[in-house]
Amino acid sequence: MTLLAIDCATEACSVALFDGGSLLAGEYRVMGRGHAEALVPMIAALPGKGKADRIVVSLGPGSFTGLRVGLAAARALGLAWNVPVLGYPTLDLIAAIARKRCGTQPVSVVTTGGHGEWFVAHYDAAGAELAPPLSMTPESATAACADLVVGSQAEALVAARGTGTALSLLPDARELAALDKACWREDLTLIYGRAPDARLPGARP
């Protein structure tokens, strides 16, 4: 069974095509902005223009725009190809990549959030998430994290704390095989991690 993986929830935009768990091809770009313009051409550059029997897409937390771009593309392709679309939590993939590189140990994932805050999630040595991800101030996150910290803000956190090990990581669709399939979900509700910046006129806070 072939699978198309899409991740554009953060500063990175990545796609990958798998066959039976083996990576056939993929592309990874750190670009900050421009996911909407880059994603479809990246998919089209894959073998067979990326067509697969299943699609898996990152659900966040991360950039509001990036999350919506990725999910919209996944849903559109799923409809066009008549294949199922599943999702996975962004921070779970980062934690899985960290376990692959560093072995089994507790890890905290810390990535760029909004309004100067960071998205933070903690995982035990077996890779189980200890609590849902939170949007935290850097000061609060510094006091809460494990010795091993990974993610886009890992180096900043360890530098501020003065102790621990930092591994700078962004999610990468090419590494999806590292993530336990138990983390995949049929519910494609995006995980924003915090309230949206904009509200409808008259909406209550």
Image (spheres, rainbow, N blue to C red):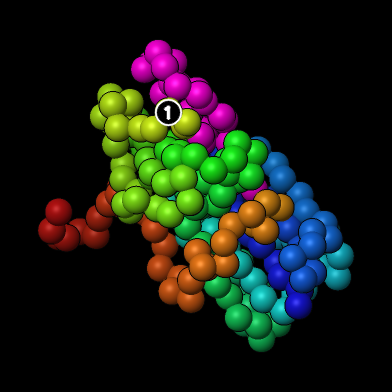
In this rendering, the answer to whether 71 lies above or below 199 is: below
For the C terminus, give its image quadrant.
Answer: bottom left
Q: Is residue 168 magenta?
A: yes
In this rendering, the answer to whether 71 lies above or below 103 is: below
Q: Position of residue 12 (x, y in %)?
A: 61, 43
Q: Position of residue 97 (x, y in %)?
A: 61, 45
* 148 relative position to 145: left or right: right
Residue at the spot 54% in from the left edge and 43% down from the top edge: 104
Residue at the spot 43% in from the left edge and 74% down from the top edge: 187
Residue at the spot 51% in from the left edge and 36% down from the top edge: 151
Residue at the spot 42% in from the left edge and 46% down from the top edge: 124
Residue ranking furthest to the right: 47
Which range of residues does the magenta coloring cover?
Answer: 150-173
Residue 179 visible in this rendered orientation of the protein:
yes
Quarter holding residue 50: bottom right
In the foreground, 109 or 173:
109
Find disc 1 in the rendering and name its residue: 147
Q: Is residue 196 magenta?
A: no
Q: Amino acid at mark 1?
A: Asp
Q: Secondary structure at mark 1?
A: loop
Disc 1 crowd, CA 10 A, few/some/many (<14, 14-19, 20+): some
Q: Position of residue 30 (x, y in %)?
A: 65, 38
Residue 198 visible in this rendered orientation of the protein:
no
For the N terminus, give its image quadrant.
Answer: bottom right
In the foreground, 201 or 162:
162
Q: Position of residue 179 (x, y in %)?
A: 59, 57
